[in-house]
Image (tube, helix red, strand yellow):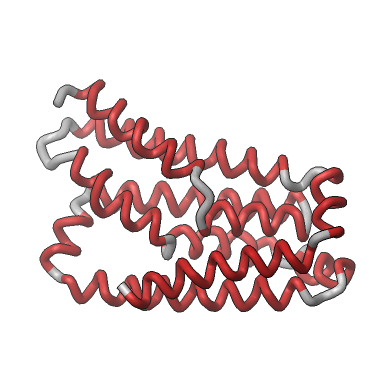
Amino acid sequence: MDALTTLAAVLGIYIPVIVTPGPNFLVVTQTAISSSREQSIHTALGVALGSTIMACLAVSGMNLLLQSFPQIQFVIHVMGGSYLLYLACKVWREGGKPAVEQHSVISQNSGQSFRRGLITNLTNPKALAFFSTIFATVLTPTSPTWVKVVCVMAIGLISTFWHLFLATLFATKRIQMKYNNFRGMIHLIAATVLALFGAGLLIL
C-alpha cells in the first residue's frame, strides 16, 4: 500500500467514525446546549487533544503493546467504563438542576470542561477500537515516518474542526431554547447512552 493510498484509507475510515454519535459527540453537544460556547469549545479542544494523543500512541505501536500485555487493555476497559458511568450519572444529575443554577456552576470551570473532553475521548470505546486496531493496522511499522506524521496531524485537525463545529452549532440560542424545552429528556437520553457505552466496556 503506497503512501497516498494509506493516507486515504486512514481518513476514509476515520471520518465516518468521528461523525457517528458516541461519547465524544455527546459530551461536546451536552456541554454546548447546557452551558456556553466557551465551555463547549474547551470540551471540544480536550476531545481533539485526546484524538491526537491516541493517534500518536497508535503509530508508536500501541496495538503491539496491548497484544503483548492484555492486562493493560483490561485496566483501560475498567477505567474507561467506570469513567463513562460516572459521566452518565453526572449528566443525569445536571438534568435535574434548574437551568440557571446549572449554567452558573459549569461556567466557572473551563479547565474542567477541557479535562472532561480529554478524558471522555481517552476512555471512548469507539476511539480505543479505531486507534488500537484499524488505525494501527493500516499504518504498519514499515510505513514511512512522514506518512505517520501526516496521518496524526490530519486526525488532530479533523477532530478539532468537527468538534469545534459541534460546539458552535449546539451553543446557538435557537438550539439552547429548544434544549430548555426538553432538557430532562435530553439529559436522560445522553446519560443512558453514556451508561450503555460504559457498561459495554466493563462487560466485554
Residue 198 image-quadrant placement = bottom left
Residue 168 image-quadrant placement = top right
Q: Is residue 113 left or right of residue 178?
A: left
Residue 154 to residue 52: above or below = above
Viewer-proximal residue, 45 or 88?
A: 88
Image quadrant for the C terminus? Answer: bottom left
Query: What residue lies at 78% left-to-right and 76% top-to-bottom?
Result: 96
Residue 66 to residue 4: above or below = below
Query: What residue lies at 61% left-to-right and 78% top-to-bottom?
Result: 89
Q: Is residue 147 left or right of residue 35?
A: left
Residue 173: give x, y in percent of width and height: 86, 45
Query: What residue lies at 39% left-to-right and 54% top-to-bottom?
Result: 127
Residue 143: give x, y in percent of width and height: 15, 34
Number of numbered labels in the structure image = 0
Query: What residue lies at 28% left-to-right and 30% top-to-bottom?
Result: 9
Residue 134: give x, y in percent of width and height: 25, 45
Image quadrant for the N terminus? Answer: top left
Residue 144: give x, y in percent of width and height: 17, 31
